[in-house]
Amino acid sequence: MTSFDGKLEKRLKDREFEKQIQEAGSRLLNPPSSVDDPLTLLDKVENLLAYVEQEPSKSMQDALLPLVKALITNKLLRHVEIGVKVSVVSCIIEITRITTPDAPYKYEQIKVIF
């Protein structure tokens, strides 16, 4: 395999990874009504976020946008199930780690979350 082939393969994997994150964020913008579905999706998101490095590429930042927005919706932040709330906060912590020092949330939003 040439260096070019390796770089192309990595870019394709990166794009697929970004697509998974973007799709999960979009699904969380309109979360399923049952408790197990958002929990399963949030667990998947948390696992995906663990692999995102700090100072992500522009394309990764764009892929994260639906997720950043979804995590602070009342549907998730004020969910009746405590497990969902814990998973949401865990994902927000991961997002904060990834985007540091440029947090995607305003001070007022952080106060509401924590």
Image (cartoon, rainbow, N blue to C red):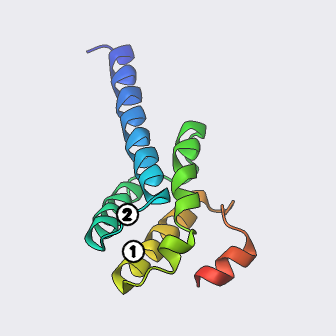
Q: Helix, strand, or loop for circle 2?
A: helix
- Name the mark on residue 87: 1
Towards the viewer: 36 or 57: 36
Where the C terminus falls, by quadrant?
Answer: bottom right
The residue shown at (54%, 65%) is 97
Q: Work out how far the residue at label 2 is from the one at label 1, CA to CA, in angstroms.
A: 8 Å
* Residue 104 in which image quadrant: bottom right
Is residue 52 visible in the rendered structure shown here? no
Q: Please give left or right for residue 62 compared with residue 34 in the image.
A: right
Q: Position of residue 34 (x, y in %)?
A: 30, 70
User: Residue reaching furthest front?
Assistant: 33
In the rendered image, the vertical position of residue 54 relative to residue 60, given as above or below: below
What's the residue at 48%, 72% (across, down)? 76
Q: In this view, does 42 lie above or below 89?
A: above
- Tag of residue 39: none
Q: Residue 46 carries which label?
A: 2
Quarter of the image where one finds residue 106: bottom right
Nearer to the camera, 16 or 4: 16
Q: What residue type is labelled 1?
A: Ser
The one of 69 and 34 positioned closer to us in this rendering: 34
Depth check: give the residue in front, 33 or 92.
Answer: 33
- Where disc 1 sits, the SS reads helix
Q: Are marks 2 and 1 in contact (CB under 8 Å)?
A: yes
Q: Residue 9: image x %, image y %?
A: 33, 24
